[in-house]
Structure formats: structure tokens, C-alpha cells
Image: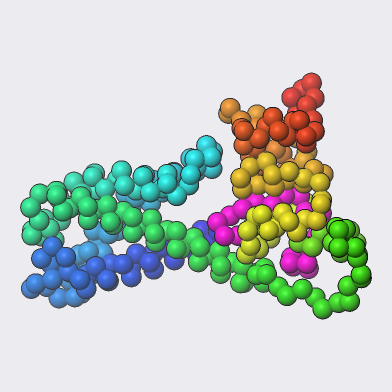
């Protein structure tokens, strides 16, 4: 995701949220204050929530990628854990806005809602940025070219004339065969080639089905790797990481290592690499 585009989308989302909260004027801030004043006041407090929560969301996403823990559950609990210290900071610096509150009984749940709102805004910004990236690159699923197709046996592999799988028909003309790996990214699949990658709006399992028998294995819940795309195997903490011929690293789920070795996909050498 382009970081600048993502940051601008997150800023826009938080600004809209601040306007909505300022319009509603919770905790007695509606009475006796103008809309502009309320938006400024709540905008500043919500900015504080963003500063507190956003680093935790980034950290939880990074931890999920390294440990295979559920990404959304980890992000949710990280944001929820920040609601108590956030409420304490708000209580200290925002007495006027919270003058109708009686202690933390209402302030903590409201801080939790704001923390989850920050999580929702970041997820919306991430998804929107992906869609804009695909639209600008012309990588959204295109219609298949209207060319005469040869008659084939229904049980045979369906490949293009040059031996490339059906998935190649979805990729732009700049993408060059072979396909090295498939990586799931939210609702998209990143197709890795020897010299670049491209995003497609589809599920990983559907993309794997369109590889038409090209030898490979799903090594992780979000990764499929072509056999010919493997260059080496490296130790990564308590797990393993596949080094692809394009320099990309693909994680290997710990529970999949034995299966991949039995299938011959990972070929052990004396030096520990493939």
C-alpha cells in the first residue's frame, strides 16, 4: 500500500469521525457550544486517540505476520487494551468536554469505542488504498480476450498456448511468465513473478485453482509457492522461510513443514538449505 495515500485516507476518515462526534456533542458538550468549537475540541481528543492506538495497530499487524496469530483478533485486543490509559489521559486534559461524566464508568467504554473507531478507519483506509492501486494499475480482473479457443479434453489441464496457466490471462501485459508465488492480501491476491508482482481482486484458493496443475504447494494459509520458484530455505526463529528466485521471502507454517518434506517439496541438503 502506498504509505502517503494510506495516511491521507486515514486523516480523512478521522476528520469525518471528528465532525460526526462534534455534531452529536456527547458528555454535555452540545449545550452552549458552537459546532465549530465542538469539532475542534473532539478533533483534538480523537487525534490523541489516533496517536495512542495507531502504533499498536501497526505492531499487532506485524506480530500477526510473524506468529500466524489471527490478525483482526490481535488488532482488536490491542486497541481495546489502550482504552484505559486513553481514558486516563482524556480525564486529565479534557475536563470541560467530560464535565457531565461521573468517573470512568462511561469514559472507559467511550474510549474503547474511539479506539475501535481508529481501528475501523485504518482498515477502511487500507482496503480503499488497495482498490485505488488496482484501479490505477489496471489490475482489476479483466475480461478474457475474445480469441478462438482450441477444443480440449474436459479432464485435461486448461493452459494457454505457451503453457502458461489460466491465471496469466488476468494479469497485465507487462507481467512475464513464470508465476513464482501467490500471496493473499485481504481480499486480493498478489501474484509474484520473477521480476515483479501484480494484485488481483480474487481469493487465494481461486487463484490456486487457475494455476492449472503447475507444480507447487500452499506453504502457509496466505502463501502458495511454485516448485520452480524456490531458491532456498532459511531458518526464521522457530520456523522456516522460503527464499524465492525473485528474492522474496515466503513464510512456511510450522504445521506444514513435515507435510512439505514428505511430499518432496522441501529437499534437505547438508548445509540446511534446499
Which image quadrant is residue 25 in? bottom left
Q: Nearer the viewer, residue 194 or 27?
A: 27
> Could you tell me residue 75's position as x and y percent?
41, 47
Q: Nearer the viewer, residue 202 or 97?
A: 202
> Could you tell me residue 199's position as x and y percent?
65, 61
User: Which residue range is magenta in the image?
Assistant: 168-188
The N terminus, quarter of image? bottom right
> Could you tell me residue 95's position as x and y percent?
11, 55
Q: Is residue 83 above or below residue 137?
A: above
In the rendered structure, the answer to whether residue 216 lies left or right of residue 206 reads right
Q: Residue furthest top?
A: 270
Q: Nearer the viewer, residue 147 or 269?
A: 147
Q: Is residue 102 above or below residue 81?
A: below
Residue 185 in magenta? yes
Residue 56 in magenta? no
Q: Which residue is painted at 21% across and 73% down in the image?
A: 23
Can residue 93 be seen by looking at this rendering? no
Q: Is residue 6 above or below residue 150?
A: above
Which image quadrant is residue 137 in? bottom right
Q: Residue furthest front?
A: 154
Can residue 54 be seen by looking at this rendering? yes
In the rendered structure, the answer to whether residue 32 lies left or right of residue 43 reads left
Q: Which residue is painted at 62% across and 37% down in the image?
A: 253
Q: Which residue is painted at 24% across and 67% down in the image?
A: 21
The C terminus, quarter of image? top right
Q: Nearer the viewer, residue 256 or 82?
A: 256
> Could you tell me residue 185's position as x and y percent?
58, 55
Amino acid at each position: 500500500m502506498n504509505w502517503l495515500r494510506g495516511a491521507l485516507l486515514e486523516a480523512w476518515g478521522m476528520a469525518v469521525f471528528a465532525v460526526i462526534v462534534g455534531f452529536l456533542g456527547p458528555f454535555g458538550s452540545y449545550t452552549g457550544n458552537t459546532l465549530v468549537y465542538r469539532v475542534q475540541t473532539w478533533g483534538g481528543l480523537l487525534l490523541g486517540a489516533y496517536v495512542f492506538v495507531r502504533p499498536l495497530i501497526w505492531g499487532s499487524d506485524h506480530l500477526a505476520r510473524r506468529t500466524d496469530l489471527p490478525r483482526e483478533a490481535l488488532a482488536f485486543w490491542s486497541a481495546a487494551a489502550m482504552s484505559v490509559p486513553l481514558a486516563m489521559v482524556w480525564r486529565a486534559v479534557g475536563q470541560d468536554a467530560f464535565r457531565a461524566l461521573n468517573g470512568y464508568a462511561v469514559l472507559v467504554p467511550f474510549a474503547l469505542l474511539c479506539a475501535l473507531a481508529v481501528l475501523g478507519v485504518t482498515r477502511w483506509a487500507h482496503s480503499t488504498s488497495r482498490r485505488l492501486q488496482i484501479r490505477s494499475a489496471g489490475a482489476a480482473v479483466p475480461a478474457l480476450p475474445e480469441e478462438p479457443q482450441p477444443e480440449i479434453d474436459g479432464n485435461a489441464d486448461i493452459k494457454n498456448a505457451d503453457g502458461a496457466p489460466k491465471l496469466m490471462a488476468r494479469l497485465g501485459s507487462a507481467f512475464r511468465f513464470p508465476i513464482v508465488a501467490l500471496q493473499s492480501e485481504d481480499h486480493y491476491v498478489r501474484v509474484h513473478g520473477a521480476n515483479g508482482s501484480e494484485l488481483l481482486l480474487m481469493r487465494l484458493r481461486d487463484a490456486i485453482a487457475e494455476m492449472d496443475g503447475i507444480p507447487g504447494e500452499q506453504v502457509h494459509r496466505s502463501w502458495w509457492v511454485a516448485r520452480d520458484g524456490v531458491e532456498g530455505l532459511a531458518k526464521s526463529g522457530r520456523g522456516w522461510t522460503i527464499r524465492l528466485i525473485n528474492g522474496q521471502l515466503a513464510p512456511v507454517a510450522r504445521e506444514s513443514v513435515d507435510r512439505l518434506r514428505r511430499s518432496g517439496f522441501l529437499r534437505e541438503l547438508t548445509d540446511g538449505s534446499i
